[in-house]
Structure formats: structure tokens, C-alpha cells
Amino acid sequence: MTEDDFERRLLEQNIQTAQVLGGAIALRDHDTGAHNLRVALYAATLGEALALDQDAMRNLLAGAFLHDIGKIAIPDGVLLKPGPLSADEQAVMRRHSELGAQLLGQLPAFQGAIAVVRHHHERYDGGGYPDALAGEDIPLIARVFSIVDVFDALTSVRPYKRGFDLIKALGIIEAGLGSHFDPGPGRLFVDLAPAAFKRFGDLPEDALAPALNDFRLRYFGV
């Protein structure tokens, strides 16, 4: 086996591991892995439009799969509570980004994904968590991911809500530009979202994974 073959196989194993781990956590939280697959597709679409380099795209995709891995440490009584969370429960839930970063800190293969895992709930105006970072102090891949994560949450059906239609969801994204979201990537995503949502938004879970194949081939050689 050549060194290139070994590196390719290692990359393949890493992204497969990230996808499986992320899907397992998503099943606990959402009863489906579709959210993780959709946000990976949206993130890759936006990342390519921003001309992110190969390393950034790899870290963005791995981070998309693993962004909620810290929820493995959140008690069921908080994570699965059907109603609104109390202030104390919200504080517990918010720990998932720090816990996820701590977990990945023990796995050398996923160091680049920590930026997404730890910082995808930061806000561009500094009002997010866990570190209250603002503007370009927030890693770019985390700024990119936060946009698509919120978009998918808005447009997805949950046991406690209906999904918003595309126009309403994009209106919320636009209203958050410069406050919640980085306005540059945010405006670009607003332009990209109609086509991306039409392509991926209604796909069943078993069709979303094959849709990722093109991105996996480009960035992980699989």
C-alpha cells in the first residue's frame, strides 16, 4: 500500500466514523439522522460557494456531522423534555458545545472539527455561547455552519412544531444578518438556499446519504 493509499483510507475511515457518531447522537435528539445529513449538504454547498480550501471543507463537513456530539452527556430529562426548558435546564443544554469540544479533544482525527462543535452557537454580535465570541473572532467554519444549522432547524418538522416555509425561514435568516449571523456568508446562503432546499429539503433520510457522495469524493477521496 502506498502512502497516498494509506492517507486516503484513513480519511475515508475518519469521515465514516464522524457520520456514524453524529447520526447516533441525532437519533437520540431528533429520532432521525436526517438533520445531520441535511446540514452537511447545506454546509458543503455554502462552503464551496465561499471557495473554502480543502482542509476547511474537510473540517466543516466533519464538524457538521459531529456538531451535537456533546449532547451524549446531556441528561434525558433535559434533552428529551417535550416542553420549554427552565433557565437552569437551558444552562445544562448549552453545555453540549463545550462537552462536545472536550470529547473531540481526545480524538486526534477530529481536531479540526472542534471549531464547529464548540462555536456553532456563537453569534456574530457576541451574544452567543459558550465563549461570547464576536465577528471574525468566531472561526469561519463555525460562522458558516451556524447559518445552515439554524436554517435546517427552521424548515424541519419537530414533534413540538411545524417546519417554516422557505420564505419565512429566509426572512428570519436575513433579519439576523449582522447580529446572529456573519452577513457575508449569510447573504450568500440566502441566494443559494432556494435551490439547495429544493434539492435536499424534502429528501428522505435514505436518499440524503447518497447525495453526499460527490462532496465525500472531492474532499475525502471516497
Image: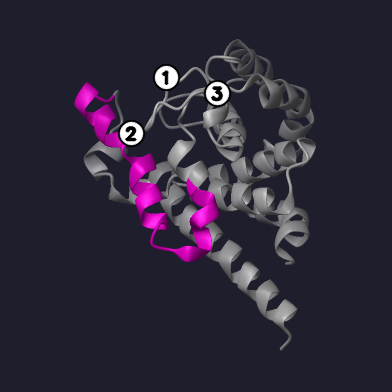
| Residue 216 located within the stretch drawn in magenta | no
Q: Is residue 100 left or right of residue 157?
A: left
On the question of residue 205 being in view, the answer is no
Q: Residues within 10 Å of mark 1 (few under 14, many from 20)?
A: some
Quarter in which the C terminus is drawn? bottom right
Queried whether the magenta region covers residue 103, the answer comes back as yes
Q: In screen coordinates, is 31 left or right of 208? A: left
Q: Nearer the viewer, residue 222 or 77?
A: 222
Counting from the top left corner in percent of width and height, residue 11 is at 64, 68
Classify residue 214 by image quadrant: bottom right
Query: Over which residues does the magenta segment extend?
Result: 85-114
Q: Position of residue 49 (x, y in %)?
A: 78, 36
- Which residue occupies 62% across, 45% down? 40
- Residue 192's x, y, as percent? 77, 28
Which residue lies at the image location 45% right of the left edge and 20% below the top edge?
126
Secondary structure type for disc 1: loop
Q: Amino acid at mark 2?
A: Arg
**188 sits left or right of 58 in the view:** right
Q: Determine whether label 2 and label 1 are within 8 Å by CB.
A: no
Residue found 67% across the figure and 74% down from its top: 7
Q: CA distance from mark 2 to mark 1?
A: 13 Å
Q: Which residue was labeled with disc 2? A: 94
